[in-house]
Amino acid sequence: MKPVFAFFLLIFGLLAQDRPNIVWMTTEDNSALWYRLYSPDFGAPMPNIEKLAKNGLVFNNAYSNAPVCSAARSTIISGVYGPRTGAHFHRPQVKVQPPEGLKLFPAYLREAGYYTTNNKKQDYNYEKEHVKGIWDESSGKASFRNRKPGQPFFHVQSNHTTHEGQLFKDLPKGEKLIVDPKDVKLFPYHQDTPLMRQKYAEYITRNHIADREMGKLIKQLEEDGLMDDTFIFQYGDHGGVLPGSKGYAHNDGLNVAMVVYVPKNWQHLVPAKRGSRIDGFVQFVDLSATVLNLAGIEIPKQIDGKPFLGKGVTLEELNKRDTTIGYADRFDEKYDQVRFLRKAKYTYWRNYQPFNFDGLHNFYRYKQPAFREWRDMARAGKLNKVQTTFFEARPAEQLFDIEKDPHEVNNLADDPAYSEILAEMRRIMKTKVRELPDVSFLPETALTPCKGNVVELLKTQKGQIQKLAAIADLQLSPYPEAKAQIAEALNSEDSMERYWGFIVCSSFGKKADSFYGKAKDLAKNDPSRLVRTRAAEFLGLSGAADPLPLVMDILEGCSDPIETNLILNSVVLLKDTTGMKITPEMVKNAKWSKIGGLVKHRVEYLIEGK
């Protein structure tokens, strides 16, 4: 049907709209602070989005649950926290399944008569059979204009202009900076160099370009006479994109813009007047429930999120929402396990492997020139204390006042004045990871036997995960109080308890010297290669033994790519923190170096150093 013809039909009431249309416009890798709408003195002018805001709602505290695209989008499309399904590992080595009986949410819209279109990025960590059939169209040509007359639609439009990969190069031909690099305000943890300033200016400019591109879709909706019946959501698909944000469960990696245009005919479905700003917290896990609620569709009980628009949502209740969680685990070949909590004005980071450092090599991260410069300057000792922190081991827990310290550089966890707040944040985090339960207390190799059905696996492993989480939390106790329980874990018949026992030992470092003998024994003789690796890692990080012959012996028998990559994460950590002398020749001649998959990125770094 021609858009003009549809417009006249709507005027004469022949196509009565009984349900709202819903459009998502997403920009990639884009924190809220890059918008003038959120940061008047810093962000990009985005007139099209600002116009939507005047006729809609601006959510001041919107959060992705993961700081990288596939994990964030998997949370969005399912409405389920990633660590509950295993969908939080970026670029899955094992595709996973949603909870039993749950469909990815566009399927419910389609069943209810909506025309569902996606242009064009999917990037979900769920098995193809669960993605199949949720879209009427999903391609670079997908358009809501292909629907039947009078059919409501849900359309997603992804914008790649702000993606991290764009900062590997210059601005598009013909585009000029809209801000002078000398005038940008740098984050406190970044080096003040011409290159870094240039990339700031480029990214601000890219947001302005993205706004212009999104304006084309808005114009289409206007031309088709759809603005009075169409909710338009504009948000970044997670935070980012300059070094230290994307990929990290920090506020700069998770806090996103969320602007929702409210159509005149459907104002009764929102809890505030058009032009309002909302302080209540919203999360990506809430998006599916919100869309279903706007469409008048029952929200499946397996969804973790709750709607922030639609029937039953009140402003009073919405503004009471003051908590969000985030998670970062494997990003391509780089492993870590960090959980983020924001409650009111405080943020809390739980670093379950605190001896890791954020700047550990990741092949995609270091394609960005400013990222490479940051690391080079750290290695050369040319950074100040705040700028160097990214390349150092971290405390097990960190606490920040986000209002006073928006970039989270002043850790309050050891300040007695904040002890009660710290205890409360710790309690919430402990409860959450146990309730999910959080599958990351098991190595990713555990996902292979369950063939992606992580939810079913967790039904039988919940008790074990709760026990492993308790072992991990020994990091938060004084060593003399934790010692006996560490010993119990290392002597356990359960390999995962021994695994976490050595992670805790590495957290304490030389304080745990009484376990050196145990570590030397198990680094050679434990039946689990992963336990042997963690034992060798403890010995290497604490300086109790040369870990090189131990890890080379462990790798010798490796053939599984997931297990090998886990082990190589420790190898790279030891190389870069202790100076472990693994040579390119050792790597080139090893059988495991030919395994491929994500292993190839670690192999390249160990051989070439880049």
Image: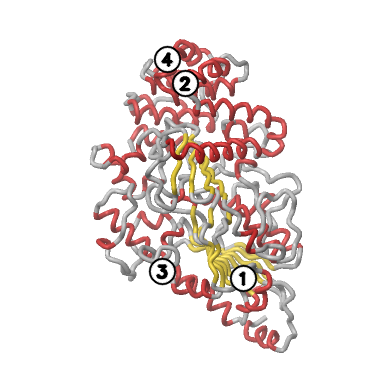
Q: Is residue 335 above or below residue 100?
A: above
Q: Which sits earlier in the primary sequence, circle 1 or circle 4?
A: 1
Under mark 3, the amino acid is Ile
Residue placed most toward the observer, 347 or 7: 347
Identify the secondary structure beneath mark 2.
helix
Give the quarter of the figure containing the N terminus.
bottom right
Under mark 1, the amino acid is Phe
C-beta proximity under 8 Å, tags 1 and 3 = no
Query: What residue does disc 2 label?
Result: 479
Q: Which sits earlier in the primary sequence, circle 2 or circle 3?
A: 3
Query: What residue does disc 1 label?
Result: 231
Residue placed most toward the observer, 337 or 165: 337
Q: Which sits earlier in the primary sequence, circle 3 or circle 4?
A: 3
In this view, the mark in front (1 or 4) = 4
Structural crowding at the residue carrying mark 2, measured as other residues with C-alpha within 10 Å and reported as few (<14), some (14–19) or many (≥20):
some
Query: What residue does disc 3 label?
Result: 209
